[in-house]
Amino acid sequence: AAGVIQSPRHLIKEKRETATLKCYPIPRHDTVYWYQQGPGQDPQFLISFYEKMQSDKGSIPDRFSAQQFSDYHSELNMSSLELGDSALYFCASSFSGRGEETQYFGPGTRLLVL
Amino acid sequence: AQKVTQAQTEISVVEKEDVTLDCVYETRDTTYYLFWYKQPPSGELVFLIRRNSFDEQNEISGRYSWNFQKSTSSFNFTITASQVVDSAVYFCALRGENNQGGKLIFGQGTELSVKP
């Protein structure tokens, strides 16, 4: 079965640079979620989109922005990167953001900021 | 506020032992959903199970079983006859019906180490 695709899988950036993470949800899934997982921590919710509209926002820095496109893929844009942004970034997708559905996670993008 | 607590930070067992991972949650929502995810050393998050708050029936899937008790706000996960491949970090997660946008609240995770 098709899974969530994230690219790139690994990314190394310098401080103050920008990064773009991409997420391709499972086919027919219309909801996308972004999470950030620091070393040794649990995943923290950043933002979600349902039918291309932002549906919830968590502890996402103002330096980050995201959107969902007409084909349902999503991109997380990160600017003015800081050392503390080094983390594993997960995208998850589900069908119909009504609450009961299961979120399936992609393999993650491991971002290292030097 | 919603919260998930996994009091066991690390558990170490020898292969073939049974092990139970505890999960306690807090929510004021009358309808909510509980999940378990597995994160092996490779890093991905693998969905294991979802349980709805109105369904307290326990579930068994092979060597895995889950015990959901609303009276104690617990959703514990048992692995029977553990194997080395079960070594991973296991996360319990909660989603309330009023979580607009559907965010999951994760526990801190329990790192399970199964030794041969």
Image (tube, rainbow, N blue to C red):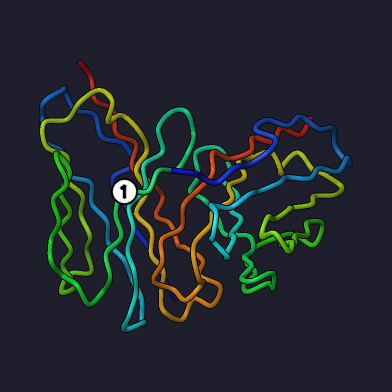
Q: Which residue is mark 1?
A: B48
Vertical position of residue B94 compared to residue B101: above or below: above
Q: In terms of image quadrants, where is residue B30?
A: bottom left
Along the line of sight, the residue nearer the viewer: B107 or A8: A8
Screen quadrant of the C terminus of chain B: top left
Foreground residue among B80 and B28: B80
Q: Is residue B21 left or right of residue A108?
A: left
**Residue B36 in the image: x percent, y percent?**
32, 52
Callout 1: residue from which chain? B
User: What is the crowding at mark 1: few (fewer than 14 residues within 10 Å), some, or many (at least 20)?
Assistant: some
**Residue B40 rendering spot, x and y as whole percentages:** 40, 32
Disc tally is 1
Quadrant, the N terminus of chain B: bottom left
Q: Residue at x 60, y 49 (%)?
A: A36
Callout 1 amino acid = Leu
What residue occupies the far top of the structure in this picture? B116
Residue at the image position 37 percent from the left and 61 percent from the top? B4
Would you say A84 lies left or right of A38 here?
right
Q: Residue at x 36, y 82 (%)?
A: B29
- Residue A34 screen position, x and y as percent: 61, 55
Q: Secondary structure at mark 1?
A: strand
Image: A97 above or below B89: below
What is the x, y in percent for residue B101? 56, 73
Q: Residue at x 22, y 63 (%)?
A: B74
